[in-house]
Image: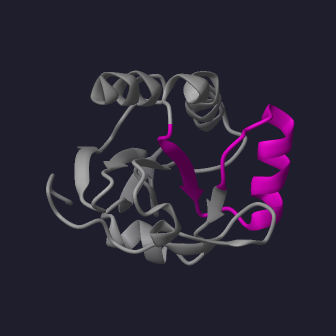
Amino acid sequence: MLAVGKKAPAIKLLDQDGNTVTLASYAGRRVLVYFYPKADTPGCTQQSCGLRDIAKKIGDTAIVGISPDAPAKQKKFADKFDLPFPLLADTEHVVAEKYFVWKKKSMYGRTYMGIERSAFLIGVDGKIEHAWYKVSPKDTPANLLKALK
């Protein structure tokens, strides 16, 4: 797991519009990077829409979502719910592995690999300020607002 004070792992992925987005492009700003299992599912929708709803309350802090979905699926999700931030496609789960959120999961007796819903607040210095592993969808926006106070 990533510890508070550790340098955040680099991110370089395509967003929902096919543009390359890097964590370095946010240098000098705080960034909330949140990982969600699958676009347009109930929990991921609740989490993403909750962040959309507080986006105007967080000042210069950026929000970036990441899931294993392809850019086209991210685009449909972003358009459907009017999400005003980049949704990045980590189809090979390279970034998810760097953040230790690519985990063995089980559902209905079946085990598989997938995203453990998590969020990270990265400071202006590029270091982890907060790491929320196994975060609930509704807690992600609340955690961010509390951390920014």
Q: Quadrant of residue 86?
A: bottom right
Residue displayed at 85% across by 37% down? 80
Q: Is residue 40 left or right of residue 58?
A: right
Q: Position of residue 72 (x, y in %)?
A: 83, 63
Q: Camera-side residue: 25 or 109? A: 25
Please, is residue 94 above or below residue 29 in the view? below
Q: Camera-side residue: 58 or 93? A: 58
Magenta highlight on residue 70:
yes
Q: Is residue 50 visible?
A: no
Q: Which quadrant, please, contains the N terminus?
A: bottom left
Q: Position of residue 95 (x, y in %)?
A: 44, 71
Please, is residue 129 above or below residue 10 in the view? above
Total marks in image = 0
Magenta highlight on residue 105:
no
Q: Position of residue 145 (x, y in %)?
A: 39, 24
Segment tinted magenta in the rendering: 60-86
Q: Is residue 30 left or right of residue 18?
A: left
Residue displayed at 60% across by 25% down? 56
Q: Is residue 146 visible?
A: yes
Please, is residue 132 above or below residue 20 in the view? above
Q: Camera-side residue: 128 or 57? A: 57
Please, is residue 114 above or below residue 107 in the view? below
Q: Position of residue 85 (x, y in %)?
A: 66, 46
Residue displayed at 15% across by 56% down? 3
Q: Which quadrant, please, contains the C terminus?
A: top left
Report the coloring of the rendering: one colour
Residue displayed at 40% across by 51% down? 116
Q: Looking at this rendering, what residue extends furthest in the front direction?
A: 28
Q: Camera-side residue: 28 or 37? A: 28
Q: Is residue 76 left or right of residue 96?
A: right
